[in-house]
Each structure stands twice: as C-alpha cells, then as structure tokens.
C-alpha cells in the first residue's frame, strides 16, 4: 500500500514537471500566450536587483508572489501607470500551474520604501537574503535576479551597437540589424573540496566577509574541460596536484554575475590502489616503457609479455608517448 501511494505521488510529480516544462517552453516561444499568462500569473518584485521579501518569522524570509492586478494597484498607488508590468520576465511555473514572473520596479524611479510598505514587505540585498530564504525559493529568486541583471547589461548588440529587443518571456534578446539572438549566459566555474582522507581544504579571499572559508573555486578558461580547469585551479591556488576527481552536483550561482558551478570532490593522497578497480598500479621507468612500446599490439595470447601498452589510436598511448618525449628532451638538455 505504502509503495503504491509512493508510486502514485511520483507519477503525479513527474506529470506536473513534464507539463510545466512544456508550458514554460510554449510561453518562451509565443509572446501572446506569455502576455496572457502574465495576467494570470504570479509576479516577484525587485528594486534595482534587490528582491522584495516578507518576513514569516524572525529567521525566515519568503519572496512575495503578487498577482497582476495587485502589482497594477501598487504601481498606481505609487504614481505609475502600470505599463512597466509588460517588462516582467518569465522565471518558472508554480505547483498550482501559475506562470511565475519577476519585475524590477527600480527603473521607474518609484520609491522603494512606499512599494515595500504597500506590499507589506521589505527589499533585502540578495547576498543577505540568501541565508534566510527557504530552500526551494532561494534558487528561484537567484534566477530572477540573474535574468533581470542580464537584461540590464545586454541592452545593446555587440556587433552593431544597436538596441536589442527582448521577447515577451525575456528568454532572449535579438538585434534586428545583425539578426544575432542573445541568450542569458552563465560562466562555468569549477568548485572542489580537496581532501587528504582525514581533512578537507578550505580557503578564503580577502573580499570574503571575515571568518568565511569556502571550497576552492575558479572560472573555466575557454576550451578547458571540467577536469582541466579543476586541476589548474587547485595547482594555481594551493600548489597541489589532485587525484580522484568525483563529480558531485551543479548549481546556478548569481554572484556577482551568473556562474554555473560544477562541484567535485578530489583527493591529494599518495598512491593508493583500489584493488576492486585495478589489479595493480606501479611506477615504470623510461626503459620499461620503451621496451613495452616495442610489443606489437595485440600480442598473441601465448606470447604475452609481462607489460604491453594500449594501441596507437588510444589517448592513453598518446599520453605515454608524450611523457617519453618529455623524458628524452629532459635527458638531452
Ligand atoms: N556557490 C558556492 O558555494 C561558491 C563558493 C565559492 C565561490 N563561488 C563563486 O565562484 C566564482 C569563482 O570563484 P573565484 O572568484 O575564486 O574565481 P577565480 O579563482 O577564477 O578568480 C577570479 C578571477 O578570475 C578571472 N576570471 C576569469 N574568467 C572570469 C569570468 N568569466 N568572470 C569573472 N572573472 C573571471 C578574473 O580575473 C577574476 O578576478 C565566484 O563568482 C564565486 O562567487 C561560489
Ligand atoms: Mg578562486
């Protein structure tokens, strides 16, 4: 019975996710549908990128979901005609199937204090609010702020210098002269918790609030893989070589501009062979490698030497060759 209930809940959840994703996608592609969804949707207000929150108890804050008519009435009370509402940006869909939008009222020169008072809320810096928001709501507010910020700093086409036009959902901006379509961007960042088996390594930047320590992080360079960026960052930041990179999870991080955080664990332990994964691992000299490279692969079963290496087209072979070349050039220097 318990399992049946669990399966029912899971399939309802799956149905909801599936439908809401399709719905959001439709709103991104259809301006008229998006405008009508806005009139029936929920809107989260910001003032110059600062979210409007409501204190539910002294420790917990929640973003305030206002209806279209509620925002219209607040804007009227504060002396605006309400045309600003069309600038709302689509951010998601609630479990009750209401499209969710965000709107920055800072542009209208409206007084943030009177807006907050009319909404019975308070505008609170997102860096502070991040620690006080509920789990599921923090990513939504972060996404909203990041999208608002992206629109603010991508008003012009990089190729023509012309103003770009957004679609109704705010999921893209296009330049009519160059036909370039711009989409909201995140910069990939690796973040790694390095461990020696017993301890983990944390660091802090001088810009961090006093006492704050975090895992090592760094922006990926153009063309780098996650692993390359991770090794480079750790080597750069603490002079260690990491092993055993294990992917953990990913996250959108809005500060200071949108980053796509790829989180991993890694170790810096000495050679420690996992005999479930590997039968053996050991050090090889250059002579042993040269000898092994002379074996024609694949050697016949009956004539297998003690050591042989992957074939030419395997990247492992390439790595071995490169290493050997390096040894040679060091010898001749
Ligand atoms: N979510 C988390 O738990 C968490 C924890 C730590 C850091 N972070 C974030 O990770 C990000 C990267 O960390 P870091 O500051 O140590 O990186 P970093 O070590 O790469 O150093 C930052 C420097 O990298 C350069 N840089 C290269 N590409 C850049 C780009 N696309 N955008 C901005 N700067 C770029 C700049 O010179 C900048 O000063 C930061 O935005 C930080 O907020 C998130
Ligand atoms: Mg760093």
Image: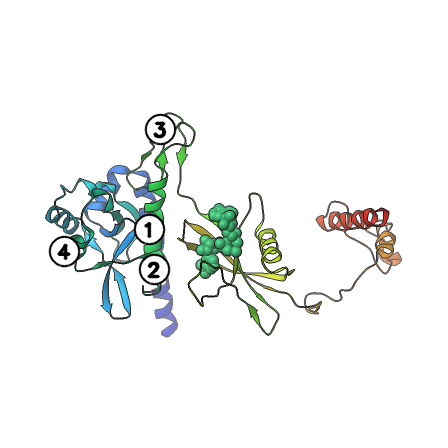
Above or below 206: residue 313:
above
Of tags 4 and 2, the one toward the viewer is 4
Q: Where in the figure is residue 144, as x and y percent of width and height?
A: 32, 51
Q: Do tag 4 and tag 2 residues touch (Cβ < 8 Å)?
A: no
Asked which secondary structure carries label 2, the reply is helix
Residues at marks 1 and 2, CA–CA distance in whole angstroms: 11 Å
Q: Is residue 171 visible?
A: no
Q: Which residue is label 4 attached to?
A: 118
Asked which secondary structure carries label 4, the reply is helix
Of tags 1 and 2, the one toward the viewer is 1
Above or below 272: residue 317:
above
Mark number, residue 162: 3
Above or below 88: residue 200:
below
Q: Is residue 271 left or right of residue 291?
A: left
Q: Where in the figure is residue 112, as x and y percent of width and height?
A: 20, 52
Q: Look at 19% across and 48% down and name the residue there.
A: 40
Q: Look at 84% across and 58% down and name the residue there.
A: 285
Q: Do tag 3 and tag 1 residues touch (Cβ < 8 Å)?
A: no
Q: Which residue is label 1 attached to?
A: 145
Residues at marks 3 and 4, CA–CA distance in whole angstroms: 38 Å
Q: Which residue is label 2 attached to?
A: 138
Q: Earlier in the sequence, mark 2 or mark 3?
A: 2
Q: Is residue 36 left or right of residue 192?
A: left
Residues at marks 4 and 2, CA–CA distance in whole angstroms: 23 Å
């Amino acid at each position: 019975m318990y399992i049946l209930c669990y399966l029912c809940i899971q399939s309802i959840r799956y149905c909801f996710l599936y439908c809401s994703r399709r719905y959001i996608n439709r709103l991104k592609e259809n301006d008229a549908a998006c405008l009508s969804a806005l009139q029936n949707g929920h809107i989260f207000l910001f003032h110059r990128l600062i979210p409007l929150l409501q204190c539910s108890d002294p420790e917990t804050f929640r973003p305030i979901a206002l209806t279209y008519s509620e925002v219209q009435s607040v804007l009227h009370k504060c002396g605006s005609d309400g045309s600003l509402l069309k600038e709302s940006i689509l951010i998601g869909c609630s479990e009750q199937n209401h499209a969710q939008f965000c709107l920055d009222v800072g542009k209208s020169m409206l007084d943030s204090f009177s807006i907050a008072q009319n909404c019975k809320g308070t505008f609170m810096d997102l860096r502070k609010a991040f620690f006080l928001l509920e789990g599921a709501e923090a990513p939504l507010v972060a996404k909203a702020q990041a999208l608002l910020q992206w629109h603010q700093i991508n008003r012009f086409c990089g190729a023509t210098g012309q103003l770009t036009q957004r679609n109704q959902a705010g999921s893209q901006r296009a330049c009519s002269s160059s036909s370039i379509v711009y989409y909201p961007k995140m910069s990939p960042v690796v973040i790694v918790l390095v461990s020696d088996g017993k301890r983990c390594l944390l660091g802090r930047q001088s810009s961090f609030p006093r006492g704050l320590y975090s895992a090592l992080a760094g922006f990926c360079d153009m063309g780098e893989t996650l692993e390359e960026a991770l090794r480079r960052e750790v080597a750069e930041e603490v002079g260690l070589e990491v092993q055993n990179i294990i992917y953990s999870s990913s996250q959108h991080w809005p500060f200071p501009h949108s980053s796509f955080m790829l989180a991993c664990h890694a170790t810096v332990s000495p050679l420690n062979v996992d005999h479930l994964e590997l039968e053996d691992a050991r050090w090889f000299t250059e002579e042993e490698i040269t000898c092994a490279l002379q074996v024609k692969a694949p050697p016949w079963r009956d004539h297998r030497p003690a050591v042989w290496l992957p074939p030419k087209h395997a990247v492992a072979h390439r790595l071995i060759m490169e290493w050997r070349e390096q040894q040679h050039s060091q010898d001749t220097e």
